[in-house]
Amino acid sequence: MSESLPPPVPADDQAFDEALIAAAFRLAATEGWRNLRIAAAARAAGLPLARARLRFPSRAVLLVRFGRMADAAALAEATEEEGIRERLFAMLMRRLDLFQANREGVLALLESLPFRPRTALLLAALTEVSMSWILGAAGAGTAGLAGKLRVKGLIAVWVWTLRAWQRDHTADLAPTMAALDAALARAERAAGWLASLPAPRPTPKAQPEETPPAAEESKENGPKEDAPKEDGREDGAKEDGAREDGDGEKGPEPPA
């Protein structure tokens, strides 16, 4: 009786990663995410430990690579033929297809998050990056304050859909699709409301003061001769003011 041969080792990194991640989620489904070890997943998949150590030094790296695989699946068939809502629906469902392919292990991961805050924070950061990519691929802007609000809104849509998926045991995921469609409809209404807010009014610039009619008339008639000084009182007042300033006293302030 011939012995069974081990599976061939994938030559490229992508195939290697996919094989190890699939084995890791199978182990997580039976042993829990807390007890998952990369070395055990590599042995279960028949992969060399040295290469597994280089490619996956920790479970955090495994989650990063799994997220990128899910994003690649979502973005693989992105088109511009439909509206933004339809594109988002298609991409998020394609992302969920990879979750569904590793369903039991992903569920074990999600169930462990309340007890693993650092893992929850990591997944939150990865999800924000993923939703930004998906929004950009759908044709929605992600720059500025409005873009950040769109990203936050899509994160809420994804979390709502993921919770529906956790409770969905149907083969066609119809309840999950219905939850995603309803969440996108709510987000679309919210985005429309934000877009309808009036833009802030610009600060009015100070208008130049109108020239008094008398001044305009003087400009038209040309410069007039100065009126004769009365008894030299004006010159005397200037001399007094100069003497007052010279004593260190502060003279009258010029008009504003």
Image (cartoon, rainbow, N blue to C red):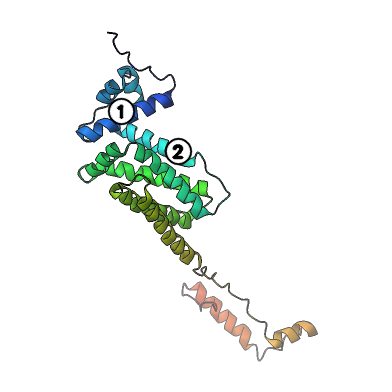
From where the camera sits, is residue 143 visible? no
Question: x, y percentage for residue 167?
Answer: 28, 49
The mark found on residue 23 in the picture is 1
Seen in the image, is 134 located left or right of residue 53?
Answer: right
Q: Tell me which numbered mark, 1 or 2, is placed earlier along the sequence.
A: 1
**Local secondary structure at mark 2:** helix
Distance, label 1 to label 2, CA atoms, is 19 Å
In the rendered view, would you say 88 is above or below 39?
A: below
Q: What element carries label 1?
A: helix
- Residue pictured at 36% horizontal, 25% vertical: 55
Q: Which amino acid does label 2 sit on?
A: Ala
Three-letter code for the amino acid on which mark 1 is drawn: Ala
Q: Residue at x 25, y 33 (%)?
A: 28
- Residue 90 x %, y %: 47, 47
Instruction: State the residue at coordinates (51%, 74%).
Output: 245
Q: Which of 198 and 79 is in front in this view?
A: 79
The residue most toward the bottom is 230
**Relative height, residue 251 to residue 176 (above, below):** below
Quarter holding the C terminus?
bottom right
> Are the residues flagged by discs 1 and 2 in contact, CB closer than 8 Å?
no
| Disc 1 residue crowd, few under 14, some 14–19, many 20+, Cα 10 Å | many
Q: Quadrant of residue 183?
A: bottom left
Name the residue furthest top.
1
Residue at the spot of label 2: 73
Nearer to the camera, 205 or 146: 146
